[in-house]
Image (cartoon, rainbow, N blue to C red):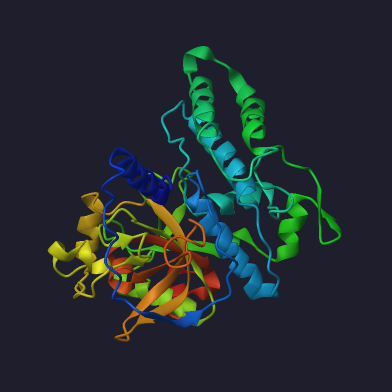
Amino acid sequence: MPFYRHSILIATVSLIAACDSNHEPPPPPPSEYQFTDVLNLPATGIKNQEQSGTCWCFSTASLLESEILRKTGDSIDLSEMYFVRNAYELKARNYIFRQGTSRFTEGGSNHDPVISMQHYGMMPESAYRGFTQGDSAHNHSKLYPEMLDSVEAWADVARQRGGSWAKGLPTIMDKYMGSVPAQFEYKGQKYTPQTFLASTGIRPEDYISITSFSHVPFYAPFILEIPANHNNGQFYNLPLDEYMAVIDHALDSGYTLALDTDASEPGFSGEEGLAVVAADPANAKTIVRKMQPERTDISQQYRQEEFESFRTVDDHNMHITGRVQDQTGKKYLKVKNSWGPKACRNGFVYMSYPYIRLKSIYVMLHKNGLPAATRARLGL
């Protein structure tokens, strides 16, 4: 998962401007695209992951917030950082027990908060913001390096430090994120993280991830071989056409989906809030502003080749909440991002179906969002 690509872009632009303050680059030409909403499913407001590589958590938390809205009509602002710190703890244990041969990074998958819920429950944002006193934004630039140094030391077989990490790692997180209350009050009721989870009606076992790759059998679960899948989460594999049909069926049935995708493509523009696949590679950068033909022949084989050649990588997680269409009637998925409401298109990225078909890694959704025939084929 990525380290907030928008922040890197902003920093790069700022550096250029500082080096040549008398010759600022001209603004980009205005976009030719005009969009109107087609489908908006219930979703909470846009958030900002700021200086933390935690898009995977914001994506899943947003999905769960929409699920609570769907189930109960109640709008709850969940604590992303409660999920994050618990995922770090599980990730650290895996890294240490495997003697440093696994992965310990800020990145993760949409499975991480779901697994975290099973172990630790969940909290509202009002009970745990993940800040220390005086902070007002997420900044893990000091937290992560300190955790990594400590985790690497605990994973060193020669040091034989035993289980001291189980107390040491929470101490580091408390230093930068604040301590977690054992109990808290929400709307006049007292909860623990476990009882709060139960009160929302969310059941972790209801959420599944589906993908489409041809190096493993279809209609069977497998462990997807991407760096972020450090917890060996299982994915259900579908043929590409059926994978895309599931996304549409889920949306039409009222279910939103968490998304893992490649956001490092020329056709993905955070500035324009658009992701498209140019038919002519020469137009890969200009198509995000100028309406040009898009590639429509995305086959299973082509998707696989892009994945196996590492031209498709998993580097950003978002949340699919609806559809939009442009002035020609062409439809796009409306995808909620976590770079704040001023980024992209008021916080959203509009992703074309060819882009999703080629560059998405997987989606996570409630299993009831699957078509009946797909559920039967998967044995769900």
Side of 331 relative to 343 (left or right): left
Quarter-of-image position of residue 84: top right
Identify the residue shown where x is 48% and y is 13%: 158
Q: Establish if 232 lies above or below 306.
A: above
Identify the residue shown where x is 86% and y is 60%: 188
Q: Can the viewer see residue 226 in this picture? A: no
Identify the residue shown where x is 51% and y is 58%: 340
Residue 295 percent location from the top left of the image:
20, 72
Q: Residue furthest top?
A: 158
Side of 44 relative to 238 (left or right): right
Residue 63 percent location from the top left of the image:
55, 64
Q: Establish if 135 lies above or below 193.
A: above
Side of 135 relative to 141 (left or right): right
Identify the residue shown where x is 55% and y is 33%: 143
Residue 60 percent location from the top left of the image:
54, 58
Q: Residue furthest front?
A: 22
Residue 304 percent location from the top left of the image:
24, 59
- Count of number-bearing discs: 0
Side of 10 relative to 359 (left or right): right
* Depth check, front residue: 140 or 207: 140
Q: Can the viewer see residue 72 in this picture? A: yes
Q: Establish if 10 lies above or below 60.
A: above
